[in-house]
Image (spheres, rainbow, N blue to C red):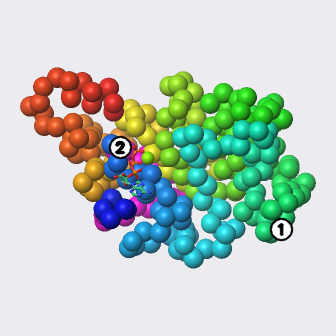
Amino acid sequence: MGGRQVIDDLSLSVHPGECIALLGPSGAGKTTLIRCMSGQLPPDSGHVLLDGQDVLSMRRSTRRRIAVVFQQFNLVGRLDATDNVLAGRLGHMSAWRAMLRRFDSNDQLLALQCLERVGMLEHASQRADTLSGGQQQRVAIARALAQRPKVILADEPIASLDPVNGEAILDLLRDIARTEGVAVVCSLHQLEFAREWADRIVGMAPDGAVVNLPARSFDARARDDIYGRVWGSKEEAGLSRLLRDLYV
Ligand SMILES: Nc1ncnc2c1ncn2[C@@H]1O[C@H](COP(=O)(O)OP(=O)(O)OP(=O)(O)O)[C@@H](O)[C@H]1O
Ligand SMILES: [Mg+2]
C-alpha cells in the first residue's frame, strides 16, 4: 500500500458462526485486511473468496453479503434509524430503485426486524445523530444485518465506546454469529476482550508476521510476537512495559 507491502503471506478461513478477532498495533494492516476482505481494496496478489467465488468478480448484490461495521458507525445523522438500516438494502435493489430510495414493504419490514434484533426498535424513528454511540453502533449492526450478510467485518467497532457498551456490542456480534450463522471478523485493540470473545485470534505484527491461534492459546508469548516488536525488548525498563500492559 502506497508502495510499501503491509500484508504478506496471510491465509485465513472464516466459517459460518465463527468469531475471529484481528489484533495488532497501529499500522499492522488490520484495516487494510478488512478492506481487502470486503472487496474495497484489490490485493496486489492473492484472492479473497466467499463460498469459492472471488469477491472482486462478484455481482454487486452478492458482494453485499459481506457487510462492514466501522468504528465511527458511519450513519447518516439527519436520517432516522430505520432509514439508515434501509441503506443496507440498497445493494440488493435495481439501480433506479436505489437512486429513488424506493423501498418495498418487505424491505421496510426487514429494517424493523433488524432494529428489533439489535434492541433498537423503540428508536426506529429517532434521528441517528441524537442516538448515543452505543445505540448508533447497534443501528449500524442492524444496517449490516439488513444486507442479509454471510460475513460481518467490523473494524474496531468498540473503539469509540465505553467498556460496558463495548462489551455489549461484542456480545451482540457473537450472538448474531451463533444464532444466524454469520461469520464475524472484528479488529480490536483489547487483548482481554479478544480472548474472551473470539474463537480464533489472528495477530498481525508490523513486520508482516502473523499469528493465527485458537483464542485460548493466544498467550503472552503470542502477544509479544505481535506487540513486542513495538514495545521493545523485555530488558527495557518500566514505561514501555507499563504502556504495553495498559494497551493490550
Ligand atoms: N490509503 C493509503 N495509502 C497509503 N498507505 C496507507 C493507506 N491506508 C493505510 N496505509 C498504510 O498501510 C499500513 C497499514 O495501515 P492500516 O490502516 O491497515 O493499519 P491498522 O492495523 O488498521 O492500524 P490502526 O490500529 O491504527 O487502525 C500503514 O502503514 C498505513 O500508513
Ligand atoms: Mg485500522
Q: In the image, residue 20 lies at what x, y percent? A: 45, 49
Give the residue type that dot 2 points to: Ser
Where's the N terminus, which quadrant?
Answer: bottom left
Q: Quadrant of residue 241?
A: top left
User: Within 10 Å of the Cα at label 2, are there few (<14), some (14-19), or many (20+) other Cα atoms?
Assistant: some
Residue 123 lies in what quarter of the image? top right
Q: Is residue 95 magenta?
A: no
Residue 187 percent across, percent down from the top left: 45, 45
Where's residue 6, x and y in %?
A: 33, 59
Q: Secondary structure at mark 1?
A: helix
Q: Which mark is residue 81?
A: none
Q: Could you say whether the residue bearing mark 2 is in a helix, strand or loop?
A: loop
Q: Residue at x 86, y 50 (%)?
A: 108
Q: State if disc 1 and disc 2 touch (CB < 8 Å).
A: no
Q: Decide whether residue 20 is among the magenta residues.
A: yes
x, y (%) of residue 67? 61, 55
Amino acid on which the number 1 mark rests in the picture:
Trp
Judged from this view, the residue extending furthest toward the front is 2
In the image as oriented, which residue stretches furthest toward the left?
Answer: 235
The residue located at (83%, 68%) in the rendering is 96
Q: Residues within 10 Å of mark 1 (few under 14, many from 20)?
A: few
Q: Is residue 199 visible?
A: no
First-in-chain label (2 vs 1) = 2
Report if the beta carbon of the residue with label 1 is closer than 8 angstroms to ligand 1. no
Residue of label 1: 96
Asked whether mark 2 lies closer than 8 Å to ligand 1, one says yes
Q: Residue tagged by mark 2?
A: 26
Which segment is the magenta one? 8-24
Q: Quarter holding the C terminus? A: top left
Q: Nearer the viewer, residue 194 or 29?
A: 29
* Spatial CA span between label 2 and label 1: 40 Å
